Image (tube, rainbow, N blue to C red):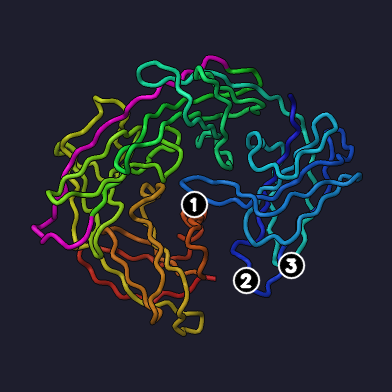
Amino acid sequence: MRRALIAAAVVVAAGSVVPGQSTATIQGHVTSASGDPVEGATVRASVVRFHQGRRRAVDVSFPATTDDHGRYRIDGLARGRYVVRATAPIDGTAQPADLRLPQPFPPQATESKEVVVEAGQTIDLDLSTTPLPTARISGRMLDPSGRPMTTSLLMEPSLRSGIVTGEPNGGTISSDGRFEFANVPPGEYTIKAFRTRGNPSKEGEFAGAYVQVAGADVRGVELKTTLGSIVRGKLAFADDEPIPQGRFYVIAERADLDETPVRPGELAHAQVQQDLTFELDGLHGPRRLELEQAPSGWILKAVHVNGVDVTDMPVPFGTEKESLDDVEIVVTSRGAQLSGTVVDGRGTQIPSYALLMFPVDRTLWYPESRFFKRVAPDAEGRFQVVMPPAGYLVAAVNPFDEQDDSWQDPDALDTLARLAMRIEAVEAARLAVTIRLLR
């Protein structure tokens, strides 16, 4: 089956809609490769967000359908960056109106346009569909003992491909463990099979495969899950600091999204016990061992594996031989404390904002970095945060959705870095600053 797809990147003035502000409109024509209007094409606008370590497209409007002149119009768009894509009818049949991104897989763009639109403006954007060759990917899932497995199976574009992706796609699975993904356009993909964990500190069986599609069917992909690695360790306190009241949790954060389980919510995290020990089970792929939760004022200072400092470094897991029995997580209450207020262009203190902190060292700009911090003001409009010692860039911006981590996109950080205040935070430092709001 051949599917005609087109996508174009559009930037609609960065930010978000505020009450009383006009929204944007994108309109235009969809034509075939020969220039003829395409009737019944489905056109969608999806906002691009940096989420869970990669750029993802999320549908934000109802799809539009082209008329007999190939015209479409999408109204009511908030400010932001969008992917606009058209799916042409197959064999003269229009696409279902409730088709969600991606279906069956994210479209491959045959042209790309970037446009900046102020509030209330209308973008004219014409799209030209081009048929794409598609292929089937097939193989078999097996459990660690070699028996057929029929559990969860997902595929999405590889992070290395640079493609803006939506939610992962599920394939068809038969009772003998054979699976198939149909209508797959050219691209680079990762396929992941996994069985859910038994408890919060244990991840399930997992297997992954990297597949390249270039128009021809890909057969014989074997996914044989493994039980993963076990990590056992102990919490230690720097400088003989007293043990605080409260709970510590340790997590193995993903260092490579292509080689680890799909959903962050399924990552193992372990509570540190009264004897200061912890255990994580079923780990696969490179991970960074970090604190997920700690009593107020306490932060991670160092991670030692068999006496070697691996703080902020990816550690490989997946096999029994890669299990670790001598991990030391060192914590401290002597982090750098930053406090202060935010003022507007006239120097007047403002009560509502989002304070963003990120490291000067770009090697620390990895997903879920412990050096990233977003802080909200207290009732008096002041902020206070404790961070690991490092050089930081600090920026105050208008409040935005707390679930939106688009500011951690390296492109966004590059922009913020040119405008942010730079501070040097050393251990146990107490810094008080006044920061001007960026608009």
Q: CA distance from mark 2 to mark 1?
A: 23 Å
Q: Of the residues tagged 2 and 1, which is closer to the observer?
A: 2
Q: Quadrant of residue 299?
A: bottom left
Q: CA distance from mark 2 to mark 3?
A: 12 Å
Query: Residue 129 location, x and y as percent?
Result: 78, 36
Q: Which residues are magenta?
A: 219-247
Q: Is residue 230 magenta?
A: yes
Disc ID at residue 120: 3
Query: Residue 44 location, x and y as percent?
Result: 72, 47
Tell me if residue 122 comes above or below residue 338 in the rendering.
above
Q: Amino acid at mark 2?
A: Val
Indicate the secondary structure of the residue bearing disc 1.
loop
Q: Amino acid at mark 3?
A: Gly
Please state if 168 lies on the left or on the right of 182 as rendered: left
Near mark 3 (Cα within 10 A), the count class, few <14, some 14-19 or many ≥20, is some
Near mark 2 (Cα within 10 A), the count class, few <14, some 14-19 or many ≥20, is few
Q: Amino acid at mark 1?
A: Asp
Disc ID at residue 409: 1
| In front of the other: 113 or 190 | 190
Indicate the secondary structure of the residue bearing disc 3.
loop
Q: Mark 2 highlights which residue? A: 18
Query: Residue 384 location, x and y as percent?
Result: 32, 71
Most distant residue in the front direction: 175
Indicate the secondary structure of the residue bearing disc 2.
loop
